[in-house]
Image (spheres, rainbow, N blue to C red):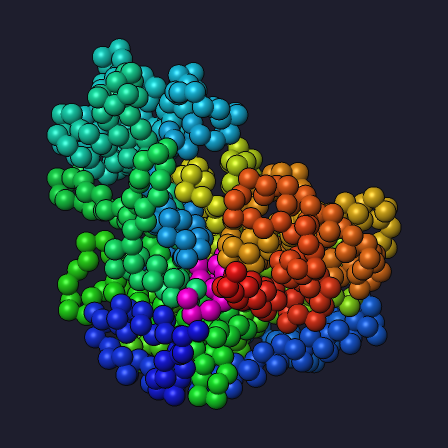
């Protein structure tokens, strides 16, 4: 084992130390000694407050547990008074208006899809960053939006014709002509500042709204691309008569490219497994490559080596004849970890593990400085043109914790020589105490707030854990129709609009978890726009391109203006736990719910612990692929722990279920050469034991979080893998 490096009274993992000094700091203008000293001093100053806030979580939870043990679910008004008395439910502040400066339009004023990807996976990170633009033809051809996708065997001309027809219908809908249909266009050209279209009957047409024409590429008489816009999103019509599709098209349209994922969150938190210095270095190194524009990844596809890198900007001539440049990449945010976790990558002066959130804040902000080189030069592929650094901060409980993050970012800015307010904060509204006090949370960071977002799964996990002693919770599927969840989703938008976030910051909604079911996504996910969200999470670049059509069809700004006049969601509804009033489930219903939860837990945990995969498409009990991360794990493990506590099931029953489902998961992963079966030796399987601990120790985990047990198990597995044979 290599000894840590001593610097500024810290003990730093040698890989991390070398990366920061030799790769990350050069080019920032920051001396290594100054960086380490500022990091050490900030941790020394803020760690006691971090510990106090975590202790406060535990104290509040103990009081809530005791109240429910005495009162059960209790009477609503008595419960509310109790929460106010202990300081869990705070008085709502008066008028709050956010005022962040230098926010890029992708966040402030535009509405569109958002991706969230593990930054440790360079291929996924590059795919997501490049998902700013996507082929509508490819997205339609390869998914189930138009019915079952082709099964291979070459190009399906009938399917292709369906795709082309759908594309023309979309153009008719979002950029309609003044006469006729896009399906009847025979020639596209640019005449002055206008788009001129020759129809198949030799008549002429233009756009019904001429200002939707933005620009073009190539010669105006025969452009290679035409750029249109709807609701701030761009549409590029690719014209190429030499292309296999364009050659057979009356107007020689080879593709329709949609501006898709306006923003992407590069995740250092729920979707990664970073348990030591080597893991943290990988995450930071990929973030550095994204900020410098140098990240590359090679892989083999169909027998050929493919190298992926960041997409360049797109250049056009605008309607006035001037040069127009559009970004070829998503605007990238970075998600740090919350306040709970510590990391062995750095030890403080007393030998204690460093608070990982403090380390993340310093390192990811410092790395983001490469987006604006200290010598004043411009990178060819910049990220945040407005000069801000966007950090999403998850798992904060109430306004004091948001204020702590705000103070941390103040310290980071001063240490790195950044202007006050450079580091923006995205607040994940995924914990109950934050939801109930959301306006006060926003007030605590109003000058740097850029984002709030709901997350059903983490929020449900916290709902279960907070009200663990109140009674047996409803099954997961039934919770989506309960009083509190609709109040939660509405309250997030109501408060965000009341704090003037529209036009200044993102109001987001959660993930579509089924990447193979795109037809269902197209039917259902438009509800997020109708709910007032200016962005919503999608599981893939393809999904982003499809979801972008929703934002072209609906004007989110107009929806938000209408929603701002409605009666806000009530705190009383938010305070209604999803407890089953009189549980009367059959033995079959109980077992089915246990099977579903146990299979999901095991399918995710075995990849996390054994292979360090923090997010992946995991087949559920019905073999439907679901995007799983720690949020899904939290709700499933807390759900079983709650039923165990209230006698709905027994420990023996749960253990039998876990063992039986482990065999199912082993079978689902039989084709993975890197997979280690659990059922061959339950006693020695670190992954199986971790999955069981998440359930059987679920009531005692801090706020029901899964990270402490997962990190310990992954560290143990890595140690086992490095032992000599």
Q: Which residue is pictured at 72% across the width and 77% down the height?
A: 62
In the rendered image, the quadrant that contains the N terminus is bottom left
Asked whether, in this view, residue 200 is left or right of residue 423, the answer is: left
Between 468 and 202, the one nearer to me in the picture? 468
| Residue 275 part of the magenta-drawn span | yes
Location of residue 706 in the rendering, given as x and y in whole percent from the top left corner: 61, 64
Up-down: is 679 above or below 243? below
Front-lying residue, 375 or 709: 709
Does the image show residue 328?
no
User: In this orientation, which residue lies closer to the viewer: 19 or 66?
Assistant: 19
Q: Position of residue 358 (x, y in %)?
A: 43, 76
Q: Is residue 723 magenta?
A: no
Q: Quadrant of residue 165?
A: top left
| Above or below, 675 relative to 374 | above
Choose between 310 and 80: the one closer to the eye.
310
In this figure, what is the number of numbered marks? 0
Residue positioned most to the front: 725
Q: Which SS does the magenta portion mostly show?
A: loop
In this picture, residue 234 sits left or right of residue 347: left
Residue at x-position 53% and y-position 33%: 519
Q: Which residues are magenta?
A: 267-278
């Amino acid at each position: 084992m290599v000894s840590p490096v001593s610097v500024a009274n810290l003990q730093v993992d040698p890989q991390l130390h070398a990366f920061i000094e030799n790769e990350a700091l050069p080019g920032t203008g920051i001396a290594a000694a100054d960086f380490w000293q500022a990091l050490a001093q900030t941790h020394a100053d803020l760690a006691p407050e971090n510990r106090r806030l975590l202790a406060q979580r535990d104290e509040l939870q103990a009081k809530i547990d005791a109240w429910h043990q005495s009162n059960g679910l209790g009477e609503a008004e008595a419960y509310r008074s109790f929460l106010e008395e202990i300081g869990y439910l705070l008085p709502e502040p008066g008028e709050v208006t956010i005022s962040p400066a230098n926010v890029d339009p992708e966040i402030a004023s535009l509405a569109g899809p958002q991706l969230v990807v593990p930054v440790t996976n360079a291929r996924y990170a590059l795919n997501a960053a490049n998902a700013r633009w996507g082929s509508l033809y490819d997205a339609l051809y390869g998914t189930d939006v138009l019915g079952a996708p082709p099964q291979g065997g070459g190009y399906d001309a009938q399917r292709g014709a369906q795709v082309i027809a759908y594309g023309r219908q979309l153009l008719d809908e979002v950029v309609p002509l003044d006469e006729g249909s896009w399906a009847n266009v025979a020639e596209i050209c640019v005449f002055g500042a206008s788009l001129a279209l020759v129809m198949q009957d030799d008549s002429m047409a233009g756009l019904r709204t001429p200002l939707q024409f933005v620009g073009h590429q190539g010669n105006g008489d025969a452009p290679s691309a035409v750029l249109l816009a709807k609701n701030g999103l761009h549409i590029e019509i690719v014209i190429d008569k030499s292309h296999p599709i364009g050659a057979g098209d009356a107007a020689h349209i080879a593709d329709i490219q949609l501006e898709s994922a306006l923003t992407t969150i590069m995740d250092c938190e729920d979707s990664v497994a970073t348990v030591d210095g080597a893991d943290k270095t990988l995450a930071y190194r990929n973030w550095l490559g994204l900020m410098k524009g140098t990240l590359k990844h090679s892989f083999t596809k169909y027998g050929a080596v493919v190298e992926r890198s960041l997409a360049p900007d797109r250049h056009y001539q605008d309607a006035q004849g001037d040069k127009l440049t559009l970004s070829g990449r998503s605007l990238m945010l970075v998600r740090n970890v919350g306040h709970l976790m510590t990391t062995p990558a750095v030890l403080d002066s007393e030998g204690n593990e460093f608070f990982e959130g403090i380390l993340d804040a310093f390192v990811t902000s410092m790395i983001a400085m490469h987006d604006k080189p200290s010598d004043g030069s411009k990178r060819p592929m910049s990220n945040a043109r407005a000069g801000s650094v966007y950090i999403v901060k998850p798992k904060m409980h109430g306004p004091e914790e948001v204020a702590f993050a705000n103070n941390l970012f103040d310290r980071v800015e001063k240490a790195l020589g950044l202007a006050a307010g450079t580091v923006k904060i995205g607040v994940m509204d995924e914990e109950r105490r934050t939801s109930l006090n959301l306006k006060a949370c926003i007030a605590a960071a109003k000058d740097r707030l850029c984002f709030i977002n709901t997350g059903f799964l983490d929020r449900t996990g916290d709902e279960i854990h907070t009200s663990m002693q109140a009674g047996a919770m409803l099954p997961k599927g039934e919770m989506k129709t309960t009083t509190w969840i609709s109040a939660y989703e509405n309250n997030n938008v109501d408060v965000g609009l009341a704090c003037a976030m529209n036009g200044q910051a993102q109001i987001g909604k959660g993930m579509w978890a089924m990447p193979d079911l795109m037809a269902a996504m197209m039917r259902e996910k438009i509800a997020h726009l109708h709910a007032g969200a200016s962005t919503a999470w999608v599981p893939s670049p393809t999904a982003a391109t499809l979801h972008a059509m929703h934002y072209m069809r609906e004007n989110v700004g107009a929806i938000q203006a209408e929603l701002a006049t409605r009666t806000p969601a009530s705190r009383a509804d938010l305070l209604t736990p999803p407890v089953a009033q009189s549980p009367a489930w059959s033995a079959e219903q109980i077992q089915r719910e246990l099977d579903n939860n146990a299979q999901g837990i095991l399918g995710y945990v075995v990849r996390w612990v054994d292979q360090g995969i923090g997010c992946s498409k995991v087949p559920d009990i019905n073999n439907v692929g679901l995007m799983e991360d720690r949020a899904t794990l939290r709700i499933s493990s807390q759900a079983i722990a709650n039923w165990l506590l209230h006698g709905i099931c027994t420990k023996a029953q749960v253990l039998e279920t876990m063992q039986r489902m482990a065999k199912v998961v082993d079978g689902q992963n039989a084709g993975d050469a890197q997979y280690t079966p659990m059922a061959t030796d339950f006693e020695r399987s670190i992954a199986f034991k971790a999955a069981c601990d998440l359930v059987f120790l679920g009531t005692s985990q801090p706020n029901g979080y899964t990270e402490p047990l997962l990190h310990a198990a992954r560290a143990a597995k890595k140690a086992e893998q490095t032992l000599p044979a």
